[in-house]
Image (cartoon, grey):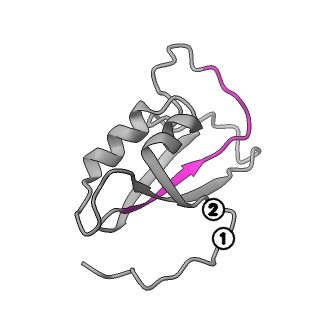
Amino acid sequence: MNVIGIVQTDLNEFNILFEDHNRRRQDGDGSQGFFGFGEQDDRGGGEEEQQNFQEMTVRIKGVPEGQKATFLQMYQIIQDAREMHDLERNLTIVNNGDEQNQQGHGTRGRQ
């Protein structure tokens, strides 16, 4: 998995957009963790393989109601994650992207 972006949509809610290749790739150094923030995979061979972008909405566990989580906190959790188990320990998954286009848009534009 390769993280494309993280957007903070509420005090303690983040949308994570990632690319899922549906295959296990060995990256040699193994330092990227579960989500890789590495370079994009440019092979120059055209658009033969289909890119599968997925979105996940999460909240950081342990942040009190009404308090703002920081982008740096979310980034560090994702960087440290080695597998889905690590994410589930630190994050509450609100929406894992299976119900596409069904999430509310009421929080969009709120500061």
Q: Is residue 52 left or right of residue 61?
A: right
Q: Is residue 36 above or below residue 4?
A: above
Q: Are marks 2 and 1 in contact (CB under 8 Å)?
A: yes
Q: Name the residue: 58% across, 38% down.
A: 84
Instruction: Give whichever of 62, 19 is nearer the camera.
Output: 62
Q: Residues within 10 Å of mark 2 (few under 14, many from 20)?
A: some
Instruction: Name the quarter where the N terminus is drawn.
Output: top right
C-alpha separation, residue under disc 2 versus residue under disc 1: 6 Å
How many numbered markers are drawn?
2
Inspect the image, locate mark 2, and give the three-letter code of the amino acid beneath it.
Gly
Q: Is residue 13 left or right of residue 65?
A: right
Inspect the image, locate mark 1, and give the three-letter code of the amino acid beneath it.
Gln
Q: Name the residue: 50% across, 14% down.
A: 29
Q: Residue furthest right?
A: 48
Q: Is residue 17 above or below residue 108?
A: above
What residue is shown with label 2?
97
Q: Is residue 44 magenta?
A: no
Marker disc for residue 18: none
Q: Is residue 94 left or right of residue 67?
A: right
Q: Is residue 89 left or right of residue 66?
A: right
Instruction: Find numbered disc 2 in the image and state the secondary structure of the residue it sits on.
Output: loop
- Position in image of residue 63 (x %, y %): 29, 55
Bounds of the magenta segment: 13-26
Q: Is residue 24 magenta?
A: yes
Q: Name the residue: 61% across, 56% down.
A: 54
What residue is shown with label 1?
100
